[in-house]
Image (tube, grey):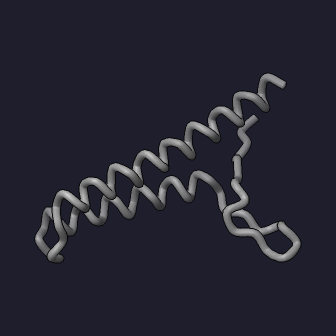
Amino acid sequence: MNREVTLPLIVDDRGTLQVAAADVSKLLRTVGGRWLRLVETGQERLDEDTVAALTIELAKLADRIDVACIAHSSGAASG
């Protein structure tokens, strides 16, 4: 069974609105990738080292979200 894991990152007054964790990790990776492309093409005056460091941190956060979701899914499947 394929289950989508959601994290309550954005919740309404009743606690029902949620954002899919996969969407969040994808967004983090997309932002980092776009920053890198801006640096590579020279379209913006961005510091290459800063952009690289921030992109790495965004990817690490996305990885942690993905690992947490995998662990959650694995635990739910075995229980």
Residue occupying image coordinates x 62% and y 39%: 68
Residue 56 lies, with reference to residue 11, above or below; the image says: above
Residue 54 lies, with reference to residue 74, above or below; the image says: below
Q: Is residue 8 left or right of residue 40?
A: right
State which quadrant residue 76 falls in.
Answer: top right
State which quadrant residue 74 falls in.
Answer: top right
Residue 62 lies, with reference to residue 67, above or below; the image says: below
The residue most toward the top is 78
Residue occupying image coordinates x 70% and y 47%: 5
The residue most toward the left is 42
Residue occupying image coordinates x 67% and y 63%: 9
Q: Position of residue 34 (x, y in %)?
A: 30, 65
Residue 79 lies, with reference to residue 23, above or below; the image says: above
The C terminus - image quarter = top right
Q: Position of residue 25 (x, y in %)?
A: 51, 53
The residue most toward the right is 14
State which quadrant residue 60 falls in.
Answer: top left
Q: Is residue 55 left or right of residue 6?
A: left
Q: Is residue 40 left or right of residue 17?
A: left
Q: Position of residue 51 (x, y in %)?
A: 25, 61
Viewer-nearest residue: 66 or 47: 47
Viewer-nearest residue: 48 or 27: 48
